[in-house]
Image (tube, rainbow, N blue to C red):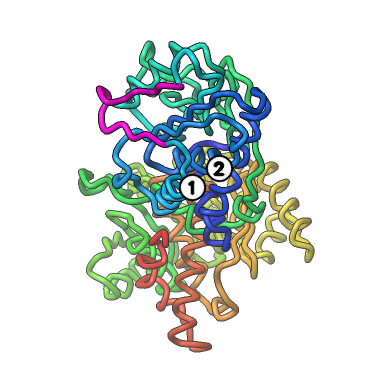
C-alpha cells in the first residue's frame, strides 16, 4: 500500500534518479490499454474521457495502443490549457495521427457521443490522486454521463471524485463520483481502493525500488509554509545542551532556525549562555545556574518544554554523572516529542518514557545503546529496523549511508560526503530534525533531515573542499530544502 502523498514523493524521486515522467506516462498508458483489451474485443467502441493533467495524459497514451478499437478521445477543456508538457505532447501526437479527438470547453458543450449508450468501454481519466473537494464542471457532468451509461468503466489510477486514501467521495457523502467497474492503479495499491466495488489492477510502470528506499527531492513535497500561518505555527524548538561546550547547542539552534522553525530557545548553563547568545540575536537563551546541566534543572527545563513543540536534547551536554541523571529524570517525566543526540543517547534504552523520541546516533553510539551494525547495507538496515522496533522510537543512524527507521519502515540516505566527519555536523543535524519534527511525523522528519543536511554538506564541500566545517551547514539549509 502507498498513500497519495507518498506516491507523489516516489514519483518525484524516480525523476531525480533519471527515470523521466514521460517514460512513466508511456508505461502507465500501456497498462491502461492492456486493461481495455482485457474487457473488450478488437473493434469495440472505446471512449477515453481525459482531464488536462497527467492523469488525462495516461489515457492519451493509451489511445495510441488501441488502434484495433473504435476510439474517441474526449478532452475536458481547451487543448491550450493542458497543464503539463508531456500530456500536451501526447495530445498533439493523437491529433497528428488523426485519432478522433473532441474538446469540451464547458459542461454544456460536452457531448460524449460514443461514451453514451453505444460505448462498450469508457476510460475515466479526468482526475487522479490528490484531488480534494467536490467535482466541478465539466467533470461533474461527465461523471454523471459515465455513470448513466451501460459501458464497462475503467478508471485510471483512481475513479474521479474518489479519495484514493480513504475510498470516500472527495466532496463528502452523496457527492458525485465515477462508479468504476475496474481501476488501473500504478506502482502499488492505494489504501482506499479496496473499499470500492471495483476490480483493481496494480501496474508496474518501471519506478525503481530506489525511489522508495532512498530519500530524494520528493520527500520535501508538502513541507512549505502555509501563507496564512502566524508566528509559532511553524514550530517552536527548545535546545537543551551545553556546559562543557558552547558550539554544539548553538549549531543545533541555528540549524533549527534555518530549517524553518519560527522560534528556537536554548537552555544552557550560565557559564556558556553569553557565548551562545553572542553567536546570533535570533536565538532566545535561557541560562541555567552552574556550569553543567543537572537534576536540579529538570523542573525548569520541563516548564520550558511545555511551551515547545520539540526538544532537542544532548548537544554539548557532556557525560557528567549529574547530566546523565538529568536526562533520565527529564525523559521519565516528559510526554512530548524530542530529538535525542550525543551523550544523552545512552540513557534512552533504560528509560521508561511516554515521549516520542527520534534518536540520532552514529554507529559507535548505536552499539553503546545496545544496537548492532553490519557492513552489508541491507543487513545493517534490517538491524536498525529491529532495534528501532525494540526501542519503540525512531532512529537515524548516521554513516556514509544513513539508515532511518521507526521499527516498521526503513529509508536510506546517500547525500553527504566524507568532509562531514568534522565535529559539529551531527549537532546541525539534530537541530534540523528538531525543526522538521515540529511540522511532520518523526520518521519523515528524520529522513528529510538526513537528506537536507547531506545536501547542505555537499554544497559546502563544493565551495570549500576539505576545508568544510560545521558552521558551513546552517546557512545552506534553506537552499537544500528546495524540492528541485
Work out whether residue 14 or residue 79 is closer to the camera in this orientation and state it: 79
User: Can you give x and y, in whole percent of width and height, for residue 362 in the image?
Assistant: 63, 65
The answer to which image quadrant residue 100 occupies is top left
Q: Is residue 104 magenta?
A: yes
Residue density around tag 2, few if under 14, some if 14–19, many if 20 or more, within 10 Å: some
Work out whether residue 124 or residue 265 is closer to the camera in this orientation and state it: 124
- Residue where numbered disc 1 is placed: 97
The answer to which image quadrant residue 175 occupies is top left
The magenta segment: 101-114
Looking at the image, is mark 1 or mark 2 earlier in the sequence? 2
Residue 208 vs 467, above or below: the answer is: above
- Which label belongs to residue 53? none
The residue at the point 45 percent across, 24 percent down is 162
Which quadrant of the rendered structure holds the N terminus? Answer: top right
The residue at the point 50 percent across, 72 percent down is 425
Residue 44 vs 229, above or below: the answer is: above
Q: Is residue 291 magenta?
A: no
* Residue 21 shown left or right of residue 399 in the figure: left
Which quadrant of the rendered structure holds the C terminus? Answer: bottom left
> Which circle, 1 or 2, is nearer the viewer?
1
Instruction: Label 2: state its secondary structure.
Output: helix
Asked if residue 302 shows in the view, the reply is yes
User: Can you give x and y, in whole percent of width and height, for residue 254 in the image?
Assistant: 35, 67
Work out whether residue 411 or residue 250 is closer to the camera in this orientation and state it: 411
* Residue 480 shown left or right of residue 324 in the figure: left
User: Can you give x and y, in whole percent of width and height, for residue 419 in the image?
Assistant: 55, 81
User: Can you give x and y, in whole percent of width and height, for residue 225 in the image?
Assistant: 29, 50
Q: CA distance from mark 1 to mark 2?
A: 9 Å
- Residue where numbered disc 2 is placed: 64
* Residue 445 shown left or right of residue 414 in the figure: left
Check contact, mark 1 vs mark 2: CB within 8 A. yes
The residue at the point 59 percent across, 35 percent down is 32
Amino acid at each position: 500500500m502507498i498513500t497519495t502523498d507518498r506516491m507523489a514523493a516516489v514519483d518525484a524521486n524516480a525523476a531525480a534518479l533519471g527515470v523521466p515522467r514521460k517514460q512513466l506516462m508511456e508505461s502507465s498508458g500501456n497498462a491502461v490499454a492492456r486493461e481495455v483489451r482485457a474487457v473488450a474485443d478488437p473493434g469495440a467502441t472505446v471512449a477515453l474521457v481525459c482531464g488536462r493533467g497527467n492523469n488525462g495524459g495516461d489515457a492519451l497514451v493509451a489511445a495510441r495502443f488501441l488502434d484495433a478499437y473504435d476510439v474517441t478521445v474526449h478532452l475536458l477543456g481547451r487543448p491550450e490549457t493542458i497543464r503539463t508538457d508531456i500530456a500536451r505532447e501526447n495530445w498533439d501526437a493523437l491529433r497528428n495521427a488523426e485519432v478522433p479527438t473532441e474538446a469540451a470547453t464547458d459542461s454544456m458543450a460536452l457531448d460524449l457521443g460514443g461514451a453514451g449508450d453505444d460505448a462498450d468501454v469508457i476510460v475515466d481519466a479526468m482526475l487522479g490522486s490528490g484531488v480534494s473537494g467536490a467535482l466541478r464542471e465539466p467533470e461533474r457532468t461527465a461523471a454523471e454521463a459515465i455513470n448513466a451509461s451501460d459501458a464497462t468503466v475503467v478508471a485510471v489510477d483512481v475513479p474521479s471524485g474518489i479519495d484514493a486514501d480513504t475510498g470516500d467521495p472527495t466532496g463528502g457523502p452523496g457527492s458525485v463520483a465515477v462508479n468504476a467497474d475496474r481501476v488501473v492503479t500504478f506502482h502499488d495499491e492505494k489504501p482506499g481502493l479496496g473499499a470500492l466495488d471495483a476490480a483493481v489492477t496494480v501496474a508496474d510502470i518501471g519506478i525503481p525500488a530506489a525511489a522508495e528506499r532512498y530519500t530524494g527531492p520528493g520527500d520535501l513535497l508538502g513541507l512549505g509554509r502555509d501563507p496564512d500561518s502566524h508566528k509559532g505555527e511553524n514550530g517552536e524548538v527548545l535546545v537543551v545542551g551545553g556546559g562543557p561546550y558552547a558550539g554544539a547547542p548553538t549549531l543545533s539552534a541555528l540549524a533549527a532556525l534555518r530549517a524553518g522553525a519560527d522560534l528556537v530557545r536554548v537552555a544552557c548553563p550560565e557559564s556558556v549562555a553569553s557565548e551562545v547568545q553572542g553567536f546570533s540575536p535570533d536565538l532566545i537563551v535561557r541560562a541555567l545556574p552552574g556550569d553543567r546541566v543537572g537534576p536540579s534543572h529538570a523542573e525548569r527545563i520541563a516548564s520550558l518544554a511545555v511551551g515547545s513543540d520539540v526538544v532537542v536534547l544532548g548537544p554539548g551536554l557532556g557525560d557528567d554523572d549529574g547530566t546523565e541523571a538529568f536526562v533520565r529524570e527529564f525523559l521519565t517525566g516528559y510526554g512530548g516529542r524530542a530529538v535525542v543526540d550525543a551523550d544523552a543517547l545512552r540513557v534512552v534504552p533504560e528509560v521508561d518514557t511516554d515521549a516520542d523520541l527520534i534518536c540520532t546516533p552514529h554507529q559507535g553510539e548505536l552499539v553503546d545503546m545496545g544496537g548492532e551494525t553490519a557492513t552489508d547495507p541491507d543487513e545493517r538496515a534490517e538491524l536498525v529496523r529491529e532495534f528501532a522496533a525494540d526501542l519503540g522510537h525512531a532512529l537515524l543512524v548516521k554513516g556514509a549511508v544513513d539508515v532511518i527507521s521507526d521499527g516498521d519502515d526503513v529509508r536510506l540516505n546517500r547525500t553527504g560526503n566524507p568532509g562531514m566527519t568534522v565535529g559539529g555536523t551531527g549537532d546541525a543535524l539534530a537541530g534540523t530534525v528538531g525543526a522538521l519534527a515540529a511540522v511532520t511525523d518523526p520518521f519523515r522528519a528524520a529522513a528529510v533531515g538526513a537528506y537536507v543536511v547531506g545536501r547542505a554538506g555537499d554544497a559546502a564541500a563544493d565551495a570549500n573542499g576539505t576545508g568544510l566545517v560545521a558552521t558551513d551547514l546552517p546557512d545552506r539549509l534553506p537552499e537544500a530544502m528546495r524540492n528541485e
